[in-house]
Image (cartoon, rainbow, N blue to C red):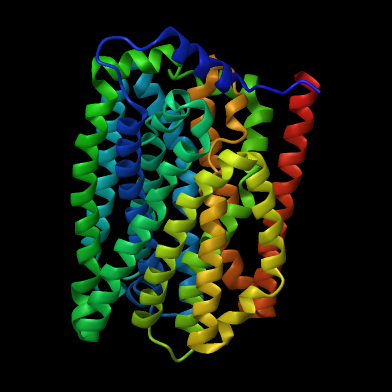
Amino acid sequence: MAQVVSSLERDARRIHASGHAHGEVQPGEIAVGVVIGRASEFFDFFVYAIASVIVFPKLIFPFVDPLTGTLYSFGIFALAFIARPFGTALFLAVDRSSGRGAKLGLALFLLGTSTVLIAFLPGYDQIGISAAWLLAAFRIGQGVAWGGTWDGLAPLLSLTAPEDRRGWYAMLPQLGAPIGLIIASALFAFFVGNLSHYDFFSWGWRYPFFVAFAINVVALFARLRMAVTPEYTELFRRGDLEPAKVSETLAAEGRGIAIGAFAPLATFALFHMVTVFPLSWVFLFTDEGPTRFLMIEVIAAFFGLVAVVASGAVADKVGRRNLLGGTAAAIAVFSGFAPQLLNGGVVGESVFMLLAFTLLGLSFGQASGVVASNFQRRYRYTASALTNDFAWLFGAGFAPLAALLLSSHFGLIASGAYLLSGALCTLAALLLNKRLELASG
């Protein structure tokens, strides 16, 4: 049977065959910009996620019990994922009218502003229920901004990477997640462990949000440099990584976007099952304080970082789709026993986190763009952005809320069932995508 070659692979060969113009852009240089951008976004993400567990239930929802307050907090957490596709549509219009540099500048300004405003947020004791409405508004602002931070560097990296090292270069953007988690968890662990309860809830929890703002400023300049220089502008043009209208893209690539959104569902469900949900469970249902578990998370994230790197080498040997399918099957097996380890004390928690992060790293390292490589050139930039948005919305946006709600009522085995459903969706999406490729190939 003839090998099916994706449209992205064909365009990558065309770009390499035509040679680069003077001032050649190397894939390693693109990778640096991608990692910086992703690390800053994920640091923002995890700062908010950790605060959703240990800060906001007490600060914003002290009038309800801790479990209900955390569920309310996770409900607000999900608003960013709902808002993100709308942000993508808004900022793609800015991209078409004013250019990628203007889009990135405005998006990162909105992200930084929303993040800083959260840092200044008064509590329920000061302004009552208005605190919750303000937090929801700032969270929506973050979601809209994340939609605008899509810079196209990840698909550009796929186009410029050597053909025999596509898996290796595909994993580089994913390094931002464990890096962001390590920094955010360590920062919160330091303040929770070294400040009094009063000082932490008065000012200590706010400091990581100011750090997030500073990191965003650095990332802004790094990404603007790559987005607006003539060399990069030409490379974006040659790769047809230009914004198309969202309505046209959905009409032309709607099926591919839907499959692409569900293909990494197992990965994104596991992502929150090991980063946000365990902290909430340990914090609510054990006598353990957050400091020790945050340090367990830091150590486990280092294992995840190594696994992300390893995924590149493995994917180049067995194929990205095969690796994603294999890890989805492993996640299905993992879901049957692993969540119960969170009731096993420090040893059980540590085993769960180390196993989960290793599996997550292998899966997450190749979760981006496996299906998106089949998009038509004209719609590749916009379709890839929308696929990313919907994958996070369906796979991650409600995962902490669903896992905590199910587990609090039916036990930890229920969270395993939730994770299993994500694994089955991934396997089904990959199978469907393969059949469509063979039918069209």
Does residue 130 appear anywhere in the picture? Answer: no
Residue 72 spot, x, y in % from top left: 48, 68
Residue 1 spot, x, y in % from top left: 81, 23
Location of the C terminus by quadrant is top right
**Looking at the picture, does residue 103 appear above or below residue 36?**
above
In the image, 353: left or right of 402?
A: left
Residue at 71% over, 56% down: 329
**Foreground residue, 66 or 256?**
256
In the image, 104: left or right of 154?
A: left
Residue at 65% over, 27% down: 254
Residue at 33% over, 49% down: 39
Q: Quadrant of residue 154?
A: top left
Residue 319 spot, x, y in % from top left: 63, 39
Does residue 121 appear anywhere in the picture? Answer: yes
**Foreground residue, 67 or 393?**
393
**Looking at the picture, does residue 416 appear above or below residue 347?**
above
**Looking at the picture, does residue 429 appear above or below residue 18?**
below
Residue 339 spot, x, y in % from top left: 62, 75
**Looking at the picture, does residue 144 appear above or below residue 272?**
above
Residue at 57% over, 87% down: 344
In the image, 301: left or right of 402?
A: left
